[in-house]
Image: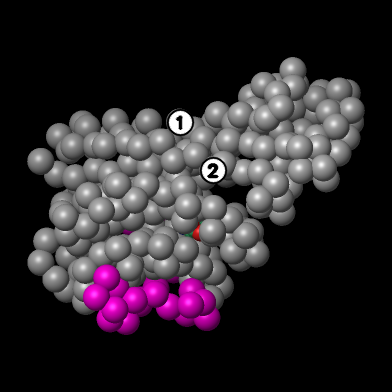
Amino acid sequence: MTDVVQTSSSWLALREPEDARSRSMQLALAAATRLGDPPIVVHDLGSGTGSMMRWLAPLLPGPQTWVLHDWNASLVASARDERMPVDRDGRPLSVRTSVGELEHVDGDDLRGASLVTASALLDVLTSEEVHAIAAASVAAGAPVLLSLSVTGRVDLIPRHPLDEAFQNAFNAHQRRSADGRRLLGPHAVAVVRGLFLEAGWHVRPVETPWRLGPHDARLLAEWFDGWTDAALEQSPHLHDDASDYLDLRRAQLTDGALSAVVHHRDLLAWSR
Ligand SMILES: C[S@@+](CC[C@H](N)C(=O)[O-])C[C@H]1O[C@@H](n2cnc3c(N)ncnc32)[C@H](O)[C@@H]1O
C-alpha cells in the first residue's frame, strides 16, 4: 500500500491502559518459555509508539533487543520519548527501529528473532500483508504472539435494536478497499490462524475483550464516536435513523449509563 494510514499517538496513548488490561498474560508467559537462548530479540510489527514493548518486555528474560517496525516514522521515533521499560531482571532494553511497509517484510528481516509480536494490527491489514507476515515469521521460526485483533463483535449495554446495523456497517468499513486491495478487518485473525496451521505450527487463541464503561469514560466515548462515524461513512442510509440513536447513546455516556464489550482475540503460534 502506498498511503500511510495515519494513526494518532493520542489515540494509542488513550487506549494503552485498556490494551494492557486486556492482552492475554497466559499467552505472554507461554511465549516466554519458547524464546530460546538469550540475548532475546523481539520484532514488534506495527509497533506504533511501543505500547506492546512497554507491556511485554517486563514479562520476558533479558538481555532484550526490540526492533520496532512501522511505516509511520514519527510514531516509532516517539517510542524513545516514552517511559522505557526494563526486562524481567530489571535490565534496560536496547531498541532499534525499522520504517517500512509490512507487505515487504520477509524472513531476512526477522532472521535471528526470538519472538515476533504485534498488537492491534492484523485487522487493519490486507491479505497480502498478513500473508507476508506469516511467511516471514515461519521462515524465521520464532514463536509469534499476535495480540488484540478485533473479531467484529461488540456488545453494548443496554442493548438497542440499531446496535446490530451499526456493527455490520462498521465491520464492512473495516473490510473496505484501500488502493484497490481489500482490508481483512475481522477476518484477519482467522486467516492468520489458517496460515500457521497450514505451515504445521501450533496455534493457541485466547479471547481478550476490552470492557469499557464509566471507569474509562473518555476511551468509551472516543471508541463509540469512531465506531459510529465509520459505520455512517460505510452505510449512509443509517443516517435516517441515527440521530435518535446517537442522542440516546450520548445521553447514556454522559450519565455513566453505557458500557461496551469490544471483542478481541490474541493468538500464540509456534513451530512444532
Ligand atoms: C492500531 S495501531 C497499533 C500500534 C501499536 N501496536 C499499539 O498497540 O499501540 C496499528 C499500527 O500499525 C501500523 N501499520 C498499519 N499498517 C501498516 C503497514 N502496512 N505497514 C507498516 N505499518 C503499518 C500503523 O502505523 C500503526 O502504528
Residue highlighted by disc 1:
187
Residue at 14 percent across and 44 percent down: it is 271
**Which residue type does callout 2 highlight?**
Trp
| SS at mark 2 in the image | strand
Residue highlighted by disc 2:
210
> What span is in magenta?
79-105
Q: Who comes first in sequence, dot 2 or dot 1?
A: 1
Closer to us: mark 2 or mark 1? 2
Q: Nearer the viewer, residue 261 or 106?
A: 261
**Which residue type does callout 1 highlight?**
His
Question: Is residue 104 rendered magenta in the image?
Answer: yes
Q: Is residue 196 left or right of residue 47?
A: left
Q: Is residue 100 left or right of residue 225?
A: left
Task: Evaluate whether residue 88 shows in this view.
Answer: yes
Question: Residue 109: x percent and y percent?
Answer: 27, 63
Q: CA distance from mark 2 to mark 1?
A: 18 Å
Q: Nearer the viewer, residue 98 or 249?
A: 249
Question: Residue 58: x percent and y percent?
Answer: 33, 68
| SS at mark 1 in the image | helix
- Image quadrant holding the C terminus, namely top left
